[in-house]
Image (tube, coloured by chain):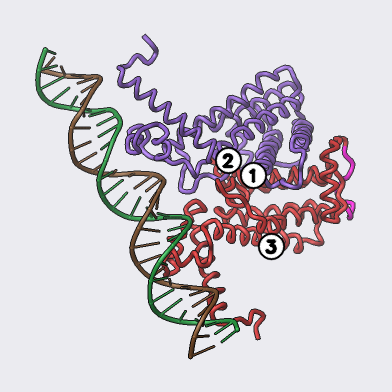
Chain colours: A purple, B red, C brown, D green
Amino acid sequence: MASTAQGARALARDQITRDIKAIGRQHLADYGAAALSLRAVARDAGMVSSAVYRYFPSRDDLLTALIVDAYDAVGAVAEQALDATRRRSTSSRWVAIGTDFLAWARANQHEYALLYGSPVPGYAAPSDTISPATRVPFALLALLADGVERGEIHTATEIPTPRTVHADFAAVRSATAMDIPDGVLSRGLIAWAQLLGTVGLELFGHLHNVIHDDDAFFQLQLQRMSTYLVAGD
Amino acid sequence: MASTAQGARALARDQITRDIKAIGRQHLADYGAAALSLRAVARDAGMVSSAVYRYFPSRDDLLTALIVDAYDAVGAVAEQALDATRRRSTSSRWVAIGTDFLAWARANQHEYALLYGSPVPGYAAPSDTISPATRVPFALLALLADGVERGEIHTATEIPTPRTVHADFAAVRSATAMDIPDGVLSRGLIAWAQLLGTVGLELFGHLHNVIHDDDAFFQLQLQRMSTYLVAGD
DNA sequence: AAGAATCGAGAGCGGTGCTCTTGCCTTTGG
DNA sequence: CCAAAGGCAAGAGCACCGCTCTCGATTCTT
């Protein structure tokens, strides 16, 4: 009847898997990735630690599942911001996406640190994570492509793109089917890096005792960056 | 006789403290911060774990000492690059500092992640770390001040600085005794965030399978950023 | 030289990830 | 419809972790 019309056993398995992930997400939000303990999650789930291994082969697998969910969550935020600002200028859309991105990062600090901070040592991102990880960059690329098509983004540039980098940029164009010139891609990656850098600076406390009005500062920097993004060079 | 002319006991203590730190630094470089184990360090140092606690009250205290050293090391790199490029243009000095910064980050990935990636959960940076942590930003500020004084950095800007941010920028000016206008400080923080963001993107693997010639890409982005930094808006 | 402070070693506590075995119970196949 | 097969929770156990405490031995101080 339901889409996943399996036996009662399979349904219970799905439910318990969801429960474990939910508790894990809570622990992640509360204590951070390094403190994510399978035993503690098991205790909160009311089962013994070895039972959890029936659902997640290792602690890292649970962590991976949470990472995938987090990438999807922040990706949805970016896509939603992109959609909701269809009729606005490219630069103001960039500011909107950046603002929502920061808001998500603030509300989910440990998740943000897990996605964009230093990777957990000894932990190699499995291939399951790469697809959801591209959602935010993909939304930004879509914004750039749209801005170019609308003629809102200056495409001329005086700074030449090295041959090897041009090849990589060309690969991005063909992989995404978006016609974004080298210079715009370069500026877009600058703006993306600046966004990650600024969010990191604030979240990780490097602006403590330096910047006090975080919101005003972030808006200023975002506005500046969006101007650079569309006006170029 | 020597500057630290203490008893044999104190000398031995200093030596052992240095040994522990050296082994800890090696473990940090090899396995990362999360895997830094006092017991493993003790084994490598040829003593029992409890003995290490005579020198470092906790694992986090050892980590803090390593963090301070790392901040000093990368700070020295930035200052050295600043010194060595005295006669070059401001924009090319920025590129030089950024290049050396990346080189240090590549050669000391785990240390870099510790300093500029996500902070270790449950670990609050003690006040000992804030002074060495400012060496790199301070070097960048010195570059900006020098560039302004030389007239190489455009100081005009069309983007207004919010009142609260202006106050913070004024505090930076008085604290550093450097006369850097709001617009230049704002652009400088953009460039600093962009640098951290780009280094993070490369080091943490987010450009994997996207950018293949990391060096060319980084140079391109640095050059672009330095142009923006001096030319403004 | 006597007392005080420091040190290395060892045992021990509670925590971690993970494995293996043991029964129970659901699901499946004849 | 009943028996074999497989998934399941539980418990014990291993090796590791941070950290504490005690106990002698050594060194420094007075």
Residue wearing tag 3:
B76
Q: Are marks 3 and 1 on the same chain?
A: no
Q: Could you give the CA–CA distance between mark 3 and mark 1, rounded to whole angstroms?
A: 22 Å
Q: Is residue B159 visible?
A: yes
Per the rendered image, the range of residues in magenta is: B149-157
Q: Could you give the CA–CA distance between mark 2 and mark 3, rounded to whole angstroms?
A: 27 Å
The amino acid pointed to by label 1 is Phe
Residue wearing tag 1:
A204
Picture residue at 80% right of the left edge, 58% below the top = B88
Residue A184 vs B23, above or below: the answer is above
Q: Quadrant of the C terminus of chain B?
A: top right
Circle on res. A113: 2
Picture residue at 51% right of the left edge, 62% below the top = B24
Q: Secondary structure at mark 1?
A: loop
Nearer-the-camera pick, B53 or A201: B53
Q: Quadrant of residue A9?
A: top left
Q: Nearer the viewer, mark 3 or mark 1?
A: 1
